[in-house]
Amino acid sequence: MMPTKTKQTPLVEFPKGEMLKLIKSFSPERIATFLDVTDLKADTLGPKLDKMANWAISLKCASVCVNPVEVDRLPLLLKGSNVAETYVMDFPLGKVDIDLKAQMTSDTVNKSRLLRGEGKGHIDIDIVINVGRFKTDPLYTLEEINAMCDAADGEIVKVIVRSSELTEEELIKVTEIVRESKAKFIKNSTGMDAYGAMPEHMKVMREIMGNSRGVKAAGGISDAMTMMRLMYAGAPNEATQIPELFRIGTSGPLNIVSSMGWLLLNTEDWLDAGIIPCKVCPFNYTSKLRPELRVHSQNRCKECIHNHYRKNKDF
């Protein structure tokens, strides 16, 4: 009987020479400028917001990312700095109708501008699309995104597509829609999905979005090596390695910045240690997926040349 032929899933690989060059082009100070310091928990209190603002200002991060209710305080905390405010609309499900979502966006933008008093250009709006509607009516998604962009009145809009709930074909399709919309960025996850940022998804998004639109990675990013892998996939050339075109959402900015120092000190050791392929493969994370996506992922694992890593794990 002929053995079953296996194949590698379309994983991003990380050549040592290219990763070494990328890492050495960064410093702890530079890596901080790509970070959206994030806390979207239901029980976030004022002292945590103060701490996030202090982190972001002292590290010169890109923004502080919170729920819209914090618009009554965050503009005042960041006033006079170069740190933007990011508000996540319709988090985490994306199930509010378009008109109401647009009204929420407009109200938040207007309140921020009034309190901060520094005009346009200090706000990012991250919106969660209605994934269910996308699967049945992609034109609804385009209308939804453009309505949010209009309501944001020229501020940066990032579109959260919840990539863990999509097949590869759906991810390609929704990224094409974002590219055709008025939005500036695409973002993979709310950080509360079945899994977080995967290099594979970042690569697909960048290839479709091109070099003039942004890609943001979020979910499970807490150290510099993880961020560098995501940047290698989602910002593979120097033209895209700027905060205007690549961002990281993280609740652990201090650990990312501090671990960058260790990464620079022992770069080759970190690269030689490598990573188990399953850890950066979207097909490995099946427990929280819908049944049809779970079966699809399990089948991909069975075909993969790396499936020996799963020999003690149920397919």
Image (cartoon, rainbow, N blue to C red):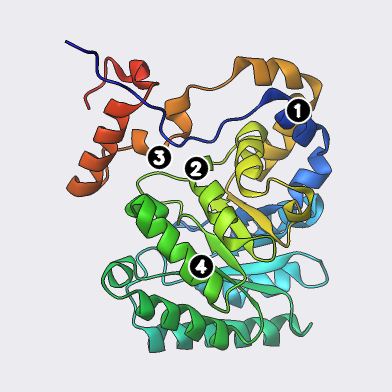
Q: Which residue is mark 3?
A: 282
The residue labelled by disc 4 is 159
Q: Give the left or right position of residue 109, taking residue 141 as reference.
A: right
Residue with the mark numbered 2: 200
* SS at mark 1 in the image: helix
Measure how far apart labels 2 and 3 are at the Cα level. 7 Å
Tell me the residue that label 1 is attached to.
Answer: 20
Pinpoint residue 69: horizontal percent, then vertical percent. 51, 73
* Residues at marks 3 and 4, CA–CA distance in whole angstroms: 20 Å
Q: Which element carries disc 4, helix, strand or loop?
A: strand
For marks 1 and 3, give the CA distance: 25 Å
The residue under the point 76% across, 28% down is 20
Going by the numbered disc 2, the residue's amino acid type is Glu
Quarter location, residue 223 = top right
Label whose residue precedes the other's in the sequence (1 or 3): 1
SS assignment at label 2: helix
